[in-house]
Image: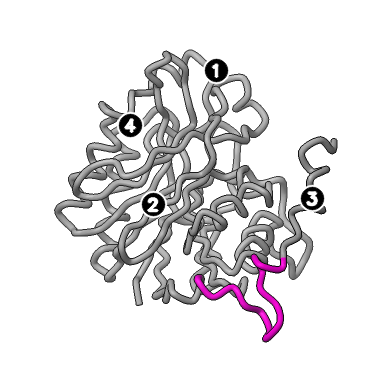
Amino acid sequence: MTVIAACQLALAVGDLAGNARAAESAVRDAAARGAQFVVLPELSNTGYVFTGPAEARALAAPAAESPALRQWRCLAEELDIVIAGGFCELGTDDRVYNSAAVVDGSGTRALYRKAHLWDTEKLIFTAGAATPPVTDLGFARVGLMICYDLEFPEWVRLAVLAGADVIAAPVNWPAHGPPPAGERPAEIIRAQANASVNAVFVAVADRCGAERGTDWVGGSVIIGPEGYPLAGPADPGKPMVLTAACEFLLARNKATSPRNDVLTDRRPVLYVDLHTAR
């Protein structure tokens, strides 16, 4: 069994030092509880609600020079853990990306740029053009994507077809008002559906606290391959560290009955219209 953690943080746009302290505190808490793999939110170093492209660019850094990634590497080496989290990246092409990385004590193991941009992100960031990376960490094969990417079933399936045992998803889910009584936010339901239909673990790290008039779902959750939460959903109103012990080998058995398998039952020849359908 491997213990993983999803850290829900209260972040502030532009407060690089304060956000770094919040991330470090949560990571140390997770490690103290036995976590070997820790997920932090989207844009966890900079905050999210930028005034425009200029503010994001001023806060961005190349991955090779990012203070956030350097902090994660130091923590990973000290605590013997692996960290996945979101950061604001200035690419070598001078474009700004909403990015995420998987980092251990040896350095950056995977880098991903968000492919599906939400709302005003399209005015600030360049969309990534690569599929979600899947990194073999020994204890698990980790697929990495960001927030709105989870709303595209094809994207999650690509990571699963590449062998992911767990999807690490740094998110900033903006709240659109409370859900109906007795219901969970749709964002959490979609994450559970992704886990269930792909027989994969999903670890979502969201954020909390208002930022420039935007509130957040605060829906951090760790989900098992049957689609049910193993930890969370988090209290939407406060920072939290969720942990769950996961048997990742369960995600490598895709059978759902003696005659069914979520991957081998696929019929890709019938899906070709997906490439051209609108």
Q: Which residue is drawn at 26% across and 44% down?
A: 72
Distance from disc 2 to disc 4, alpha carbons, whole Å, reads 28 Å
Residue ID for mark 4: 16
Instruction: Kindly check if marks 2 and 3 are in contact, taking CB atoms under 8 A apart as contact.
Output: no
Kind of residue indicated by mark 2:
Thr
Q: Which one is in front, 4 or 196?
A: 196
Q: Position of residue 272 (x, y in %)?
A: 79, 45
Of circles 2 and 3, the one toward us is: 3
Q: Which one is in front, 206 or 245?
A: 245
Q: Where is residue 125 in the image (x, y as percent from the top left)?
A: 54, 23
Instruction: Indicate which disc residue 199 carries.
Output: none
Q: Which one is in front, 72 or 178?
A: 72
Q: In which quarter of the image is the C terminus?
A: top right
Using a 10 Å C-alpha cutoff, classify the residue at mark 2 as few (fewer than 14 neighbours), some (14 to 19) or many (20 or more).
some
Of circles 2 and 4, the one toward us is: 2
Instruction: Kindly check if marks 1 and 2 are in contact, taking CB atoms under 8 A apart as contact.
Output: no
Distance from disc 3 to disc 1, alpha carbons, whole Å, reads 39 Å
From the viewer's perspective, is residue 9 above or below residue 166? above
Of circles 3 and 1, the one toward us is: 3
Q: Which residue is drawn at 36% across and 31% down?
A: 15
Distance from disc 3 to disc 4, alpha carbons, whole Å, reads 45 Å
Q: Position of residue 25 (x, y in %)?
A: 27, 53
Residue ID for mark 2: 135
Distance from disc 1 to disc 2, alpha carbons, whole Å, reads 33 Å
Tag 1's secondary structure? Answer: loop
Instruction: Kindly check if marks 3 and 4 are in contact, taking CB atoms under 8 A apart as contact.
Output: no
Tag 2's secondary structure? Answer: strand
Residue ID for mark 1: 52
Instruction: Indicate which disc residue 271 carries.
Output: 3
Q: Give the range drawn in magenta.
A: 252-265
Reading the chain from its start, which is encountered first: label 3 or label 1?
Answer: 1
Location of residue 89 (image quadrant): top left
